[in-house]
Image (cartoon, grey):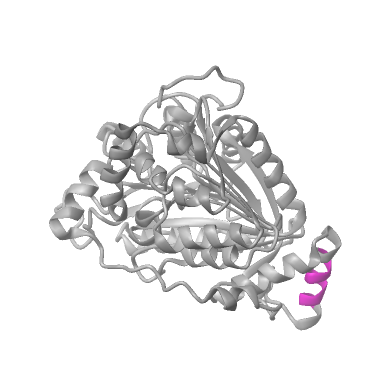
Amino acid sequence: MRKTSGLLIALSLLGLQACSMLPVRPPLSTAAAAVPSRPALHGVKGPMAPQARQRVLAQLAAEGKADLSSRHLALLTQAGSLPFYTGNQARLLIDGPATFAAMFAELEQARSSILLETYILEDQGLAQRLAELLLRKEAQGVKTHVLYDALGSVATATAYFDALRAGGVAVCAFNPVNPLTRPGHWDLTQRDHRKILVVDGAVAFVGGINISEVYASGSFGRRKSRSAERGWRDTQVQLRGPAVLALDTLVREAWSAQGCGSLPGPAAAPASTAAGTQVIQIIPSGADGNEARMYAALLTAIDGAQRSVHLTMGYFAPGADMIAALTEAAQRGVDVVLILPSMSDFAPVLHAGRSHYEVLLQAGVKLHELQGAVLHAKTAVIDGVFSTVGSSNMDWRSFVGNNEINAVMIGDDFGQEMEAMFRRDLAASAPVTLAQWQARPWLQRAKEQAARLLESWW
């Protein structure tokens, strides 16, 4: 959701852009030759002993595609030092109605704590219902904290947040627009683009969905419309198990780093028991020392892909290394398919992404544009075993300028769910052919080239 991008671009062009850089892409031979190593697996009691690790790997093998699962565990281990959490349950949630139904059901059951971190928190529709519920839970003794991005939520009336505070809910703005609001925490070019909800340290939600009325209706089954206000297509994942602890900790760290005041510790140790068999890695990215972790993980997974790379991306302005990774994968016989938007709430990034179409198509990458809905999802499933759902777009700002969060699920079972979702989106999309694209009008080409010049600012 890019309603504030114009201000960010202006600030960037004035020289306020963060100086973070993307990591250097490793040689393709390194990823292609990666062999299974010893990933850092964490269970409910912390790092796992060798025997327990082998049991987890055996469970992944039982799902199918054992070699591919082991391979992508090795690739992720190679790309960074973040642990993998075992014993989780992951539930795929498609679009706003399913996501908010699940979130509100968990909030109703909250007994000790609610932690919400979001980019956009509107003051109408769903957000009003959320406010009423948070106030009621706070009155029941549930410690409730809300961290919202000041620029992403700039259109929200201060009265909305004041009402929450008056009811006892702890509310804090990330990098306030007014530098005098909270001295020492002002950087308009660094935004908190994460969407995280943690309830009682036991269940968490992460993905691309903001607290916004545009998600009130689903994206499937609607008649085609050019409206950017209805039928948004997005994805969230609901987690139980040890991975929840990582998300709980991240929200608390962001709250503390922003100088938002004291925040009580969890009432009980989060995720004290295994909830399932899913292996999950939580990947935070940001301008404050977390580097471009999701960018590195995606590049490594694409470079190491052997069968398929299926990406669904709402904002696509990927840069040279990512284009190279996608084209090289297609050229070595990997089934590379991208679902991209046909309409957007921010036209420049749409045109910037389209400026890469011809190169991708010539390399054998298959492109499709989702019809009848605004695509906002940021998901990928690679080789059917590497699945990610999160807030990271495939653009420069997500990779180096924003605080982002992604969950990566390893294994064939969840991968099959992701592939089914991908096929559903594919059926609602129109293919883009090379002949069709080369025949596009000159005005479209001009828009693409103009947008391409500022691709690194989107």
- Residue 409's quadrant in the figure? bottom right
Q: Position of residue 9 (x, y in %)?
A: 22, 48
Among all residues in the image, which is located at the extreme top?
A: 223
Q: Position of residue 324 (x, y in %)?
A: 48, 62
| Closer to the camera in the image, 453 or 412 | 453
- The residue at 36%/33% (across/down) is 345
Q: Position of residue 254 (x, y in %)?
A: 39, 60
- The residue at 47%/39% (across/down) is 376
Residue range highlighted in magenta: 52-59
- Residue 316, relative to residue 244: is it above or below? above
Q: Please state the total of marks drawn on the protein image.
A: 0
Question: Does residue 136 show up?
Answer: no
- Residue 236's quadrant in the figure? top right
Among all residues in the image, which is located at the extreme right?
A: 62
Magenta-span inclusion, residue 56: yes
| Closer to the camera in the image, 41 or 436 | 436
- The residue at 23%/59% (across/down) is 17
Position of the N terminus by quadrant: top left
- Residue 439's quadrant in the figure? top left
Q: Is residue 277 left or right of residue 194?
A: right
Q: Is residue 165 left or right of residue 43?
A: left
Q: Position of residue 209 (x, y in %)?
A: 49, 40
Q: Is residue 133 left or right of residue 413?
A: left
- What secondary structure is the stretch in magenta mostly built from? helix
- Residue 344, relative to residue 298: is it above or below? above
Magenta-span inclusion, residue 340: no
- Residue 52, relative to residue 436: is it above or below? below
Question: Does residue 67 show up?
Answer: yes
| Closer to the camera in the image, 34 or 267 | 34
- The residue at 42%/31% (across/down) is 343
